[in-house]
Image (cartoon, rainbow, N blue to C red):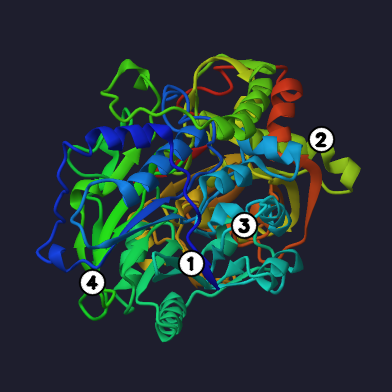
């Protein structure tokens, strides 16, 4: 498919600024010895992991981020990329706007779209921003294919969604977009007469970390990418961009080392903040910089390839300015114009220099930000209980150790499943498991009122409380081995399918594990490749010993309350197709109901101490 780059709308702010400077500034030279060889300057604007954060950058950062300000920044950068007096005369200039995935995310903001229906606010926002191509991320499948189809249906003129290693034929609601040319393996954009190929990739871990149902992902990334490169080159395309969502920029760098023909790569899913000295950052981000912008990979033929990404949530617009010679080789990077461009409003909270402040785009504000903000405000105004203690929902905590928020959520699963079991003809569960990756607030909620919004922040996904009956004790130990299988740095080296989100928060029992043991390794079908030896002891709350010294004790099977995501094998939990019964409540509803009815509206310090109760013990 050949598409022309989308028309640009330039803001008055950018126009006035550039006109004021045009007589004072001389064009900046390009970085690199071959700057004079540049035939075509391409400004690649990009973001990833927008994840429905359309209002602002969050608590304490209300003066930053948000889709309305993001659009203004994009418009200003697009205008300047073509018309600004920043480089030598003679070379053509073009600009693209790309996303490398996770374009929406479950939570209170996206709940507004689910309540409102098609068109979804996130799709309205992305259409107003004006992307030339978009990759799909794992979170785009979190609600299943039907909601992703509704999201795509929300566009009036959708950009190409690029996904070279994904087969949608098993999902008719998505295959129709393939048939209509909306979802494509790659696309060709014509900009100022130059042909630019864009290839999209999805993480092979998709079946384990999201809900793609019958969507199939090809894990042969090298073969897929090289085939797309060869096809594009055969069509006369000599400038090729890879927009992948591989969860970590190192995965993109490794992939590039095995292929030939990629000129630029845009990573997604890792939220790495790349920045250079002098770049303006959001407050608190100074210590979060992963490395320089861009990173540099080396392809199989020894060619240097710039690799870029941004941290997510509409906080930054990435800007990479690359110079191509007439043969389509990258011969220069305009270093002074490349890097993260933060999204900031008028006063930046009074904390930082604000020469880059922008006004929110009025159309985006009216059509997206205002209605979503009103919806979230309604959730925030609904108080459902009180906590006597701070609740630890930090990502780094819930994915590595017991936390009191994790205990609260696991308890809510056990309570809700027990309450609903008779109505669904299932046995009341003995224990409950909640994966840390399903806990998303990434904050410490202070003691005080708990609102309905808090529960959405904590557990936002479309996960439903589920009972899995008759899990043998041996299999239950394997479930726990999986929970602690990806806790050490080396685990991610020896196990390509590792993900930290599988760490479990638990209810109905306690267990002891040791990091010195061998981590469980499963294949893609849940079969054991390497047995785990980290789980040492498991004891039910009634004193029944399930595992002692790493040895499973004989006895009756267990009934497990969990979420359907895990019951289906998400995060590689080895239920192995065991039958399960959803009991009619989302895990957000279970948490809300438990706070209000299960514990009478009060989260006590006695039941949920800040350090946890000792349900999970990690020995050296």
Measured Cα–Cα span from mark 1 to mark 2: 45 Å
Measured Cα–Cα span from mark 4 to mark 3: 31 Å
What percent of the width, then of the height, locates residue 74?
A: 42, 43
Relative to residue 414, is residue 341 drawn left or right? left
Mark toward the viewer: 4 or 1 = 4
The residue tagged 3 is: 158
Earlier sequence position, callout 2 versus callout 3: 3
The residue tagged 2 is: 419
Earlier sequence position, callout 1 versus callout 3: 3
Label 2, residues with CA under 10 Å away: few <14, some 14-19, many ≥20: some
Measured Cα–Cα span from mark 2 to mark 3: 45 Å
Earlier sequence position, callout 4 versus callout 3: 3
Residue 254, placed above or below residue 13: below
Residue 221, placed above or below residue 80: below
The residue tagged 4 is: 325
The residue closer to the viewer here, 609 or 336, is: 336
Query: Quarter-wise, where is residue 599 in the image?
Result: top right
**SS at mark 3 in the image:** loop
Mark toward the viewer: 4 or 3 = 4
> Visible in this render: residue 20?
yes
Q: Quadrant of the N terminus?
A: bottom right
The residue tagged 1 is: 200
The residue closer to the viewer here, 203 or 41, is: 41
Query: Quarter-wise, where is residue 508 in the image?
Result: top right
What percent of the width, then of the height, locates residue 148?
A: 67, 55
Residue found at x 28% / y 27%: 355
Earlier sequence position, callout 2 versus callout 4: 4
Does the residue at mark 4 contact the one at mark 1 (Cβ under 8 Å)?
A: no
């Amino acid at each position: 498919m050949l598409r022309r780059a989308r028309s640009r709308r330039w803001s008055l702010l950018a126009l006035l600024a550039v006109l004021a400077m045009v007589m004072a500034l001389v064009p900046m030279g390009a970085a690199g010895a071959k700057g004079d060889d540049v035939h075509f300057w391409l400004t690649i604007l990009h973001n990833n992991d927008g994840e429905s954060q359309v209002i602002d950058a969050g608590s304490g950062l209300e003066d930053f981020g948000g889709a309305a300000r993001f659009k203004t920044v994009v418009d200003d950068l697009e205008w300047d990329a073509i018309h600004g007096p920043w480089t030598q005369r003679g070379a053509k200039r073009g600009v693209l706007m790309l996303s490398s995935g996770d374009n929406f995310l479950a939570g209170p903001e996206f709940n507004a779209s689910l309540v409102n229906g098609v068109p979804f606010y996130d799709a309205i926002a992305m259409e107003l921003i004006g992307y030339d191509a978009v990759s799909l991320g794992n979170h785009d499948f979190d609600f299943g294919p039907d909601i992703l189809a509704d999201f795509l249906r929300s566009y009036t003129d959708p950009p190409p969604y690029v996904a070279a290693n994904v087969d949608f034929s098993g999902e008719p609601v998505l295959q129709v977009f393939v048939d209509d040319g909306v979802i494509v393996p790659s696309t060709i954009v014509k900009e100022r007469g130059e042909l630019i190929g864009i290839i999209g990739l999805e993480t092979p871990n998709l079946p384990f970390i999201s809900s793609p149902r019958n969507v199939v992902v090809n894990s042969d990334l090298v073969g897929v990418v090289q085939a797309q490169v060869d096809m594009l080159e055969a069509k006369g395309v000599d400038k090729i961009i890879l927009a992948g969502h591989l969860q970590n920029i190192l995965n993109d760098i490794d992939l590039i080392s095995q292929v030939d023909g990629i000129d630029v790569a845009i990573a997604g899913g890792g939220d790495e903040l790349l920045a250079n000295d002098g770049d303006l950052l959001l407050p608190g981000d100074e210590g979060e910089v992963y490395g320089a912008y861009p990173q540099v990979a080396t392809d199989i033929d020894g060619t240097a390839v710039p690799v870029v990404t941004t941290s997510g949530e509409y906080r930054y617009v990435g800007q990479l300015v690359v110079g191509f010679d007439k043969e389509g080789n990258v011969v220069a990077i305009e270093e002074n114009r490349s890097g993260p461009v933060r999204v900031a409003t008028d006063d930046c909270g009074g904390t930082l220099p604000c020469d880059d402040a922008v006004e929110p785009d009025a159309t985006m504000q009216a059509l997206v930000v205002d209605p979503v903000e009103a919806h979230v405000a309604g959730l925030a105004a609904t108080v459902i209980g009180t906590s006597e203690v701070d609740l630890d929902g930090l990502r780094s905590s819930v994915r590595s150790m017991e936390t009191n928020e994790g205990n609260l959520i696991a308890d809510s699963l056990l309570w809700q499943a027990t309450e609903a079991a008779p109505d669904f003809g299932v046995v009341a569960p003995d224990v409950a498991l909640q994966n840390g990756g399903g806990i998303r607030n990434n904050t410490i909620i202070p003691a005080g009122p708990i609102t309905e919004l808090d529960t959405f922040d904590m557990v936002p996904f479309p996960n439903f409380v589920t009972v899995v009956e008759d899990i043998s004790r041996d299999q239950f130990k394997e479930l726990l081995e999986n929970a602690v299988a990806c806790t050490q740095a080396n685990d991610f080296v020896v196990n390509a399918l590792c993900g930290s989100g599988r760490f479990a928060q638990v209810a109905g029992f306690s267990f002891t594990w040791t990091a010195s043991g061998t981590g469980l390794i499963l294949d893609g079908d849940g079969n054991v490749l390497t047995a785990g030896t980290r789980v040492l002891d498991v004891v039910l709350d009634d004193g029944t010993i399930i595992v002692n010294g790493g040895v499973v004790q004989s006895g009756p099977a267990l009934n497990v309350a969990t979420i359907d995501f895990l019951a289906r094998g998400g995060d590689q939990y080895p239920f192995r197709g065991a039958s399960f019964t959803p009991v009619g409540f989302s895990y957000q509803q279970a948490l809300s109901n438990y706070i209000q009815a299960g514990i009478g509206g009060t989260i006590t310090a006695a039941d949920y101490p800040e350090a946890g109760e000792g349900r999970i013990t990690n020995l050296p």
